[in-house]
Image (tube, rainbow, N blue to C red):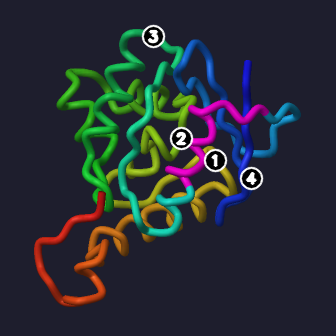
Amino acid sequence: MPQLSCLTPVGDVTFSEEDGAIVALDWGRGRDQDRTPLLVEAVAQLQDYFDGKRTAFDLPLAPFGSAFQRRVWDALRAIPPGETRSYGDLAQSLGSSARAVGQANGANPIPIVIPCHRVVAAAGRLGGYSGGDGASTKRVLLDLERRATATPQGPQAELFPSSPGTTPR
């Protein structure tokens, strides 16, 4: 399985590809380094994300999981960048329990790209995070997205720094 690692502000991460789709993003540096076009694009998009130039990813994804887990992961991708939803909110929208949503969230094989960091505990408490340095990594990702969605991007950002309604890609 081809893998490619990169250094990010939250540590080393490694993308894995199978059959032309991203199947995993793991914390740490992978042993093998293969520069396939898809993995190079995934790393470039992740670097844009950390540079505040991108808040969503446009990559073919094929996470391995149950039908329920995939439903949860689809719901995670529907949460707008810089916003959060509680486990209970997601459970209600999926007709499930908060515990089941939490387990599926924790099993997410492609964190950041499938934004499990956007799910918080009841009453907006940050809750835990299984990637990087735990909750502090979750806070970094949420803060990064909030800054990116509040700041205009592109050439117009330099010309019109207070231009409302400009959204990052």
Q: Residue at x 42, y 19 (%)?
A: 69
**Alpha-carbon span between mark 4 and mark 1:** 11 Å
Mark closest to the chain's N terminus, 4 or 1: 4
First in sequence, mark 3 or 4: give its number.
4
Structural distance between the alpha carbons of marks 2 and 1: 8 Å
Mark 3 and mark 2: Cα distance apart in space: 17 Å
Quarter of the image where one finds residue 74: top left
CB under 8 Å between callouts 3 and 2? no
As drawn, 85 above or below 9 = above
Give the structural element (helix, strand or loop) at label 2.
loop
CA–CA distance in space, label 3 to label 1: 21 Å
Q: Residues within 10 Å of mark 3 (few under 14, many from 20)?
A: few
Q: Earlier in the sequence, mark 3 or mark 2?
A: 3
State the CA–CA distance, disc 3 to disc 4: 28 Å
Name the residue carrying label 2.
111
Q: Which residue is mark 1?
A: 131
Task: Answer whether labels 2 and 1 touch (C-beta < 8 Å).
Answer: yes
Q: Earlier in the sequence, mark 2 or mark 4?
A: 4
The span picked out in magenta is 34-46
**Percent x, y of residue 89:** 23, 41
Q: Depth check: give the residue in front, 97 or 58.
A: 58
| Quadrant location of the C terminus in the rendered image | bottom left
Q: Which mark is residue 66?
A: 3
Q: Are marks 3 and 1 in contact (CB under 8 Å)?
A: no
Relative side of 164 to 100, left or right? left
Name the foreground residue: 143 vs 53: 53
- Horizontally, is 136 left or right of 117 in the view? right
Q: Residue at x 60, y 47 (%)?
A: 43
Q: Is residue 123 visible?
A: no
Q: Which quarter of the picture shows residue 93?
A: top left
In the image, residue 98 sits, relative to residue 163, either above or below, namely: above
Q: Are marks 4 and 1 in contact (CB under 8 Å)?
A: no
